[in-house]
Amino acid sequence: MKRPELLMPASNLEVLKTAVHYGADAVYIGGDAYGLRAAARNFNSDEMREGIRFAHAHHVKVYVTVNIFAHNKDLAGIAEYLEELQQIGPDALIISDPGVFDLARQHAPDLDIHISTQANNTNSGTFGFWHRLGAKRVVCARELSLDEISQIISAMPEGMETEVFIHGAMCMAYSGRCLMSAYMTGRDANRGACTHPCRWSYSVIEQTRPGEELPVYENERGSFVFHSKDLCMIDHIPDMLDAGIDCYKVEGRMKNALYVATVGRAYRNAIDTCMKDRGAYEQKLGWYLEQVKSCTYRDFCTGFFYGRPSDDAQVYEGSAYHAGRTYLGIVGDTLSDHEFMLEQKNKFSKGDMIEIMGFSGGDRKARVISIKDAEGNEQESAPHAKQMLRITLSEPVQSGEILRSTETCSEESR
């Protein structure tokens, strides 16, 4: 059985390196423009070059999103951007718009093209169409079941690859093509500026009763009728393997390094274990689910993989995430086995017991022995986000390892 590719998201260079350390076979990123996550920090040209060099040194591929639905005024800029990407040299471009696809063939002819899920790829004819035009991979529409995906794979031409989303936020719109944000705020989801109005609270007002909100909501926080649960397929890896899918994709280009490390490591372990010994995989299901719930998440569902979702796939109680572990930072330059530099992400104190996330799954608890600022002055705590600190722990660390709290947060965050 062919080992499927695990494709992880990265919002910036730090997260890309984390994805590589924690098991990604490939990472997808966005540039400064023309991707569908304009609110992410994204990569400038120099960061993209550095990220690709780092990933390739670790035998990991990098794909760049150019997946907006372009308007005429975008085309000249996209052509110029594609020429730049041709020089930078990622492994593939992720594209949804046929016009952008055509420009990529002209201005970045050496780069593979993957067809985004935004292109509504729901049948074998569509896969064959893109293959004849020169695409290497097609990302399945989220509305497909595993049975439908298996049928498409059996009918695909040789050399065409399939990719599916297996984890992360779901969109209530068809393959993510939504007009709500553009209509309500002027920010177009199909051009990378979604404001996520599907997560907002709504009430109904009857036309002859202006100003009177009707009680259609389930609790005092409102109705969340457009708000879907998160996708999670980590406890269905055998079915994914049997379907013959080439690439498993995790959603989350707005997520931080803790999310990418936690989810990436769990899926890497689940895939590799299941391919070797399905019995061993079944025995570890509790650990896998515990891991993906240790970073912020919404309630989970299986999307469309087993048929049309029921009402249970929607969230009616509220739009808040469940809280996970607190993200403390990433081990930077090491000064000794136990001492290192850290850009602090959330507060911790001298004497605290924290957790070091091992790259392959072995977490270690460690006590914070000392905290110093960049000049070497002692501190009792690290209360200021982004402060550069010199940390000593009771246990040895490796550069790139994630530090997190040992306990789940008590509060929920949106």
Image (cartoon, rainbow, N blue to C red):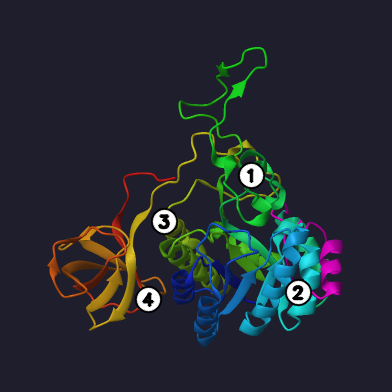
Q: CA distance from mark 2 to mark 3?
A: 37 Å
Pick whichever of labels 4 and 2 is earlier in the sequence. 2
Closer to us: mark 3 or mark 1? 1
The answer to whether mark 2 and mark 3 are in CB contact below 8 A is no
The residue indicated by pointer 4 is: 400
Residue that appears at 40% across and 56% down: 294
Query: Which image quadrant is residue 122 in?
Result: bottom right
Query: Which image quadrant is residue 208 in?
Result: top right
Name the kind of residue labelled 3 in the image: Cys
Closer to us: mark 3 or mark 4? 4
The residue indicated by pointer 3 is: 295
| Image x and y of residue 281, in percent | 51, 66
Name the kind of residue labelled 2 in the image: Ala
Which residue ends up furthest to the top in the rendered image? 208
Pick whichever of labels 3 and 1 is earlier in the sequence. 1
The residue indicated by pointer 2 is: 104
Q: Which residues are magenta?
A: 120-144
Q: CA distance from mark 3 to mark 1?
A: 32 Å
Pick whichever of labels 1 and 4 is earlier in the sequence. 1
Q: CA distance from mark 1 to mark 2?
A: 28 Å
| Image x and y of residue 104, in percent | 75, 74
Closer to us: mark 2 or mark 3? 2
Residue that appears at 70% across and 59% down: 117
The residue indicated by pointer 1 is: 186
311 up-or-down from 267: above or below = above
Q: CA distance from mark 1 to mark 4?
A: 40 Å
Name the kind of residue labelled 1 in the image: Gly
Q: Secondary structure at mark 3?
A: loop
